[in-house]
Amino acid sequence: MRLPSSSSTTHLLTYQPETSQALGYGFRCGFLGLFHMEIIQERLEREYDLDLVFTAPSVEYEVTKTDGSEIVIDSPVELPDPTQIAEIREPWVQIDVYTPTEYIGQVMDLVTQRRGEFKSQEYLDQRRVMLSYHIPLIEILTDFYNELKARTRGYASLDYHFEGYRGRYGTSGRAGEQGAGGCAQHDRASGSDV
């Protein structure tokens, strides 16, 4: 299999060449979700007999430096010296969780554990409710959907859309300590059922 050397984007997959000190040459890929990633991984391994290394999904962070310039990082290695960081912003999304009313408490608990901020609650009928939250994208990328399904016995569903970037780290020096650990690929597309 041969991938073009320049970055490419389709409606299903985005990829660009990447070099890592730890892993060497490869590609940074963006998928529609974890299930889509698993399907592509399975096909590449089976059809092309490739030995692939997949890392945990992550996001891009925007960094404002003290001189006013801005950069986008997708690896902690790209962070400037902590004394040069004025602010680091992370991507946030709005999520709408549709669930039977009996699971409101479990859903609220899950979202608040993931730094979610309550926005609204709307009863769709006597048995169903829509809970809306603002939440960092990184908090829903890995196992959020599976946990949501587990806590609601499979009855809840999830819609989300990209909201924008919010500051997370300021000039307190915490940026260098917390950094942007785990920064990698980020797909800004909206979607349902992560």
Image: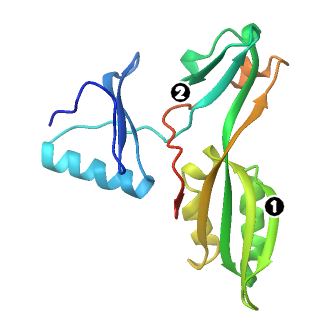
Number of the front mark, 2 or 1: 1
The residue at which mark 2 appears reads as: 74
SS at circle 1: strand
Residue occupying image coordinates x 64% and y 71%: 151
Q: Is residue 180 visible?
A: no
Farthest residue to the right: give it.
172
Residue occupying image coordinates x 35% and y 53%: 38
SS at circle 2: loop
Q: In the rendering, at what x and y percent does residue 173 appear?
A: 81, 16
Marks 2 and 1, the one that precedes in the sequence: 2
Amino acid of disc 2: Asp
Residue 81 position by quadrant: top right
- Locate the N terminus and report the quarter of the image it occupies: top left
Amino acid of disc 1: Lys
Considering depth in this image, is 148 or 61 the residue closer to the camera? 61
The residue at which mark 1 appears reads as: 119
Considering depth in this image, is 98 or 105 the residue closer to the camera? 98
Q: Is residue 170 left or right of residue 192?
A: right
Find residue 34 and name its label: none
Disc 2: CA contacts within 10 A as few (<14), some (14-19) or many (>=20) = many
Q: Is residue 132 left or right of residue 184?
A: right
Q: Is residue 48 left or right of residue 70?
A: left
Residue occupying image coordinates x 17% and y 50%: 46
Q: In the rendering, at what x and y percent does residue 188 appear?
A: 54, 44
Q: In the rendering, at what x and y percent does residue 167 appear?
A: 77, 32
The CA distance from mark 2 to mark 1 is 29 Å
Image position of 157 with respect to 35: above or below = below
Disc 1: CA contacts within 10 A as few (<14), some (14-19) or many (>=20) = few
Q: In the rendering, at what x and y percent does residue 55 appear?
A: 43, 37
Farthest residue to the bottom: give it.
126
Q: Is residue 76 visible?
A: yes
